[in-house]
Amino acid sequence: MPTIDQLRDKSKKKFVKSDYRPWNYMEEIEKESNENQLEINKESVRDQASPLLIEKEQKIEINGESIEDQLELNLAVITESLSADPNLEIKKQDIQAKSISANSIIHETTLDTIFRLSGHQKKIFMFIFERCASRAMLSTGVIQGDILCEITVTTLKMVKTSIQRLVGKGLINRERGKTGRGGFYIFSLSEQVRNSSLEYKRMVGFENQLGINKNSIDNHKAINQESTPGDKKNSLTEEWMKINIYPLEEIGFKQNHLIDIYETQLADPQMVQESILHFAYGLEYQPEKFKQYSDLLNVLIGRLRKGKPWFEQSYRSPQEIAQAELLETKKVGLDRKKKMEEDAFKLALAEWQDESSPSELALITAKKGVGDIMPAGAKLSKYFRDTIWPETKKAYLISEE
């Protein structure tokens, strides 16, 4: 409400004739309306400047490079819109400080992101990491939603929200699970996230930082022995229980990996067994081919989980390899035995010649007609082999009984 002084000053003002005519009166009113709207827009820009930057900070983890460009563009637009009126200056330093803070978030490492986790997100992420670590894999296998609710002591809706935020931060990946009754989750980690998590665990510990009951994890591991989605050992059918995983035990293939493949219901037990044998054959006889894989176990299991077999073109079954090795061993042993017998024969022949009289040897080597062209040495060797050697070899060779 105007004061008395304001009314007094207003009465002293001289009358000034308007520069518009009656027929363009509406144009003048529109002009004043536009000016008022401009003032309102400037006020709105000033009020929305800080929330705008805060919103950008929340979305900063989605797309680093494009968000950084948008922050600079928004700051330029706000500054330009306010430069028209010096009376509407806002705290540009605060906006620039928020922009610098947002840029620092863009360039943070995975380990920094893990350190900034808190509340439900931290509990769920550390549980997922521990699950992968216990399986020696980058995949968690089946996780019931009730378990996550128990760990976080919250509702399933809050659990789903936390999972979405962890996915948005690039810390976890959601694999094919099941919705509805009997539904479950399957998560996976990248190698970079796994390595960063191991570093985090080494730096700050696990149990002290997790802030949940350790029994919850033990209970979840006991899911492997429950009926839904199945007793992990007993859930395997008889055919799956017969699969021999021994050939790949050296690279860490265990029973829980076999169970993980079985849960997908995409692989056949015979195909899994053949793939294990083929993979083991390649590792032993073609090791150069496998040097390109940083994680051999995940390569094979990832393929089997998709229902795809592993084949080696030059593969030979263990039975075939064993048969070939047995025949080769027998062949080598037979050749070695023949050589020893031949050496013993030559030794015995030389000793017999030394002990025999020249007349006796001459009688054996004498020609028996015009067609007799056999050399003397050959006649002596033949005579010794046919007549003397059958009785003499007992003294040179050990009989096999």
Image: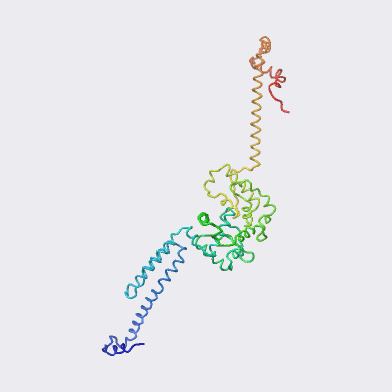
Q: Is residue 379 visible?
A: no
Residue 309 position in % (x across, y down): 60, 51
Q: Is residue 97 left or right of residue 223?
A: left
Residue 363 position in % (x across, y down): 68, 11
Residue that extends furthest to the front in the rendered view of this protein: 208
Q: Is residue 15 left or right of residue 315?
A: left
* The N terminus, quarter of image: bottom left
In the picture shown, does residue 312 fall above or below 66?
Answer: above
In the picture shown, does residue 284 fall above or below 353?
Answer: below
Q: Residue at x 52, y 47 (%)?
A: 292
Q: Is residue 238 visible?
A: yes
| Displayed quadrant of residue 5 | bottom left
Residue 297 position in % (x across, y down): 57, 50
Q: Residue at x 56, y 55 (%)?
A: 138
Who is closer to the viewer here, 370 or 161? 161
* The C terminus, quarter of image: top right
| Displayed quadrant of residue 354 | top right
How many marks the image carries: the answer is 0
Residue 184 position in % (x across, y down): 61, 62
Who is closer to the viewer here, 47 or 63? 47
